[in-house]
Amino acid sequence: MTTTLDTDTLTTSDGVRLRVWEHGPADAATTLLLVHGWTLTTHTWDRVIDAVLSGSSVRIVRFDLRGHGESAAAPAGSATIERCADDVAELIAQRVPTGPIVLAGHSMGGMTIMALAERYPELFAARVAGAALVATSSGDLVAPTLGLPAPIASVANRVEFGVRGALANARGKRLSGNSRALRPGMRWLLFGTGPESRDVADTADWVAACNPSNMAGFRTSLAAHDRAHALTALRSIPVVVLAGLKDRLCPLPHARRIADALPDAELLLYSGAGHMLPLERTGEVADRITELVHAAEPVRH
């Protein structure tokens, strides 16, 4: 279990209460800010945090995205990647006003970092000292193939579009009250070879707790995500791009496009791993993030 320094809430400029966690020494020179993915929660990072804290003296700040986990639902029209980037900027302004920052984003969390770079390039120029982009994409998410043959993928996308419409009109606070029923689908969609049953169960719990109308709103925002141009703001900092070779949602070509846009970035590929790298390859993800943290630490004389 991750040791927590502080847990409280941050109220955004549009009135959404976000659950925030802080770990590690409050006076650390460098802060690591973690952003989780679509339909998940910040607990995706739990084991990574434990590993990072065992190898570095860093302050870690993380939060549940609006409409996810323990944060409040996103008001109508605000379940977007752009608004999540604004939330991160507000979190930094209020909780990390000084010092170097290392950013790590998984899936939509990585896309949020790209939107942050697009909307706040001055923040990257002045404060951001490294970034880990984990199982993510810079665009082309309108109709993912999910590794299926084209005709089947086309049918799956039509079905998904219909489900998205139903979710958009849902009035419940949770997607489902029975996460067990989601486990086979989560196992197939999100994981690679031989995942731990506990990881699949936890992931199903997180997805079940997602606000359904917000889930639909974010899916629409994912389809509109096209931010290869925003990667320019990351060219002057150390970046690692991590991808699982069995990732159905953000397969290898997505990682390669990001790496191509960032010639100095390190592209790391994990055989047998799927989309849930923070769970499937915890040690490797933590090691790469720890390296970024060490590189960002100010030189002491």
Image (cartoon, rainbow, N blue to C red):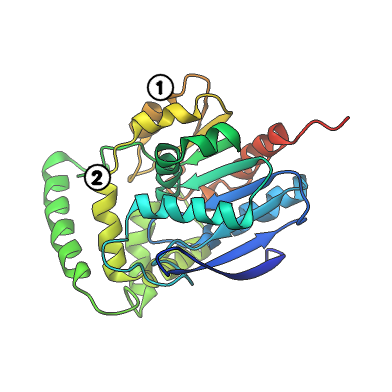
Q: Residue 121, position in %: x, y?
A: 47, 35
Image height of 228 relative to 57, above or below: above
Q: Left or right: 221 with respect to 298?
A: left
Q: Which residue appears at 55% of the width and 24% of the height?
A: 236
The residue carrying pointer 1 sits among few (fewer than 14), some (14 to 19) or many (20 or more) residues within 10 Å by Cα, namely few
Which quarter of the image is occupied by the N terminus? bottom right
Q: Can you identify the residue that label 1 sits on?
A: 260
Image height of 113 relative to 13, above or below: above
Q: Which mark is residue 14?
A: none
> Of tags 1 and 2, which is closer to the observer?
2
Which quarter of the image is occupied by the C terminus? top right
* Res. 270 in view: no
Q: Dot 1: what SS?
A: helix
Q: Residue 260, position in %: x, y?
A: 40, 22
Name the one closer to the observer, 71 or 179.
71
Choose the circle earlier in sequence order: 1 or 2: 2
The amino acid pointed to by label 2 is Ala
Q: Are marks 1 and 2 in contact (CB under 8 Å)?
A: no
- The residue sitting at the top extreme is 263
The Cα atoms of the two marked residues, 1 and 2, are separated by 21 Å
The residue carrying pointer 2 sits among few (fewer than 14), some (14 to 19) or many (20 or more) residues within 10 Å by Cα, namely some
Q: How many marks?
A: 2
Q: Left or right: 138 with respect to 105?
A: left
* Res. 185 in view: yes
Q: Residue 274, position in %: x, y?
A: 42, 46
Q: Can you identify the residue that label 2 sits on?
A: 224
Q: Dot 2: what SS?
A: helix
- The residue sitting at the right extreme is 301
Q: Which residue appears at 16% of the width and 51% of the height?
A: 157
